[in-house]
Amino acid sequence: MLRVGLTGGIGSGKSAVATRLAERGAVIVDSDRIAREVVAPGTEGLAAIVAAFSERVLAADGTLDRAALGALVFADATARRRLEEITHPRVRARSAELFAAAPADAVVVNDVPLLVEVGLAPTYHLVVVVRTAVAIRVERLVRTRGMSRAEAERRIAAQADDARRRAAADVVLDNEGGLDELHAAVDALWSARLVPYERNVREQMVVPGGPAVSTAPDPTWPQQYARIAARIRHALAPDDLRIDHVGPTAVPGLAGRDVIDVQVTVPSMAEADGPVARRLADAGFPRVPGVQGKRPRWADRDAGTGGDGDGGWAQRLHGSADPGRPVAVHLRVAGSAGWRHALMMRDHLRADPDRRAAYLLVNREAAASAPAGTAADPWFAEEYLRAQEWAARTGWRP
């Protein structure tokens, strides 16, 4: 099963996206609909709201007067938090029931207006944000929901802004054109990413990492890493393992292969082969078969120990099931040679622009002409010693 979080600001067109995904075959778990169900007449949710806000939020027929309640909470942050404390746990519980009831091969889309605000992004395999300019959203709310302009602006201001949503988004769908344009974007997302992603998660398949060639630095790499790390951290909870951004994408301004390298520190390889591996696979990071880790040709045999029989260079490698985002998750034992090397080389290159330039040059030459990638070995051997000297000189610690 693939778990997709769908969100967007009020008036952005999120419901149109959910409707189109349902037409493609997705199972929709609509948090707005569930939010109405859990406060229907006779429910504990409605009783709790009345106890908190009095009977002035009830309509004459005993149902919740949503307009009256909205007028209270959207003008008062404390009142809004009190309402969320009542409704959110009930919505989450009902959503979990619906997820559990979906078929094993389903793409389940959770339509959640406040997904970013309540910190749910790491609980999904993928987060899709529908973005529309505030001015357009205001006009839509005035035209389609009968709000005054001031009320529409108040509702929008009460939610996360575009920058905060974009930081949580794996996919951003712009909805400032016509419905046909939006449908085309949704259809492409469905066929090119969601369907293969679901199959890969179910079959524990890793997507290829792409050619070993450098690309221009992407300023969003750290933000992408942050989303991936949060997803991994959630998957591994309650274990609180160290997670680091390593590799070329962890060094600002450094070109490299467009693969996010993540290092997860494990207490032992036995732990990496057990519960950690299962949790990562369920979260969309399956194990790469056969990769055990070995001492690089250029590494000094005395560079570290890890009790793994290979001079401390053993690792377990996981990849990404998401065809839209190649990832390499390296499981290494704390203090081992490979673990220390990944952190030391990252920090060494971050600290020295001249060494970054040299790295870029040798990377380009190796990608262009090196048989089996061996041409860069002498440079890495020298750079490894240079990084060790830098670490000793500066007092660097992992």
Image (tube, grey):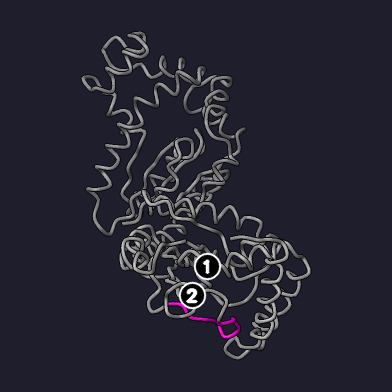
Q: Given the image, on which type of amino acid does mark 1 rest?
A: Trp
Q: Give the range drawn in magenta.
A: 292-301
Q: Residue 312 carries which label?
A: 2
Residue 57: x %, y % from top left: 36, 12
Reading the image, the residue beneath label 1 is: 339
- Residue 65 seen by the camera: yes
Q: In which quarter of the image is residue 213?
A: bottom right
Q: In this view, does 221 lie to the left or right of 4?
A: right
Among the two numbered marks 2 and 1 on one chain, the one whose residue lies closer to the N terminus: 2
Q: Measure how far apart labels 2 and 1 are at the Cα level.
A: 8 Å
Q: Residue 58 carries which label?
A: none
Q: Main secondary structure of the magenta part?
A: loop
Residue 345: x %, y % from top left: 64, 68
Say whether marks 2 and 1 touch (CB < 8 Å). yes
Magenta highlight on residue 295? yes
Q: Which of 111 and 242 is in front in this view?
A: 242
The crowding category of the residue bearing disc 1, from other C-alpha atoms within 10 Å (few below 14, some 14 to 19, many at least 20), is: many
Q: Given the image, on which type of amino acid does mark 2 rest?
A: Gly
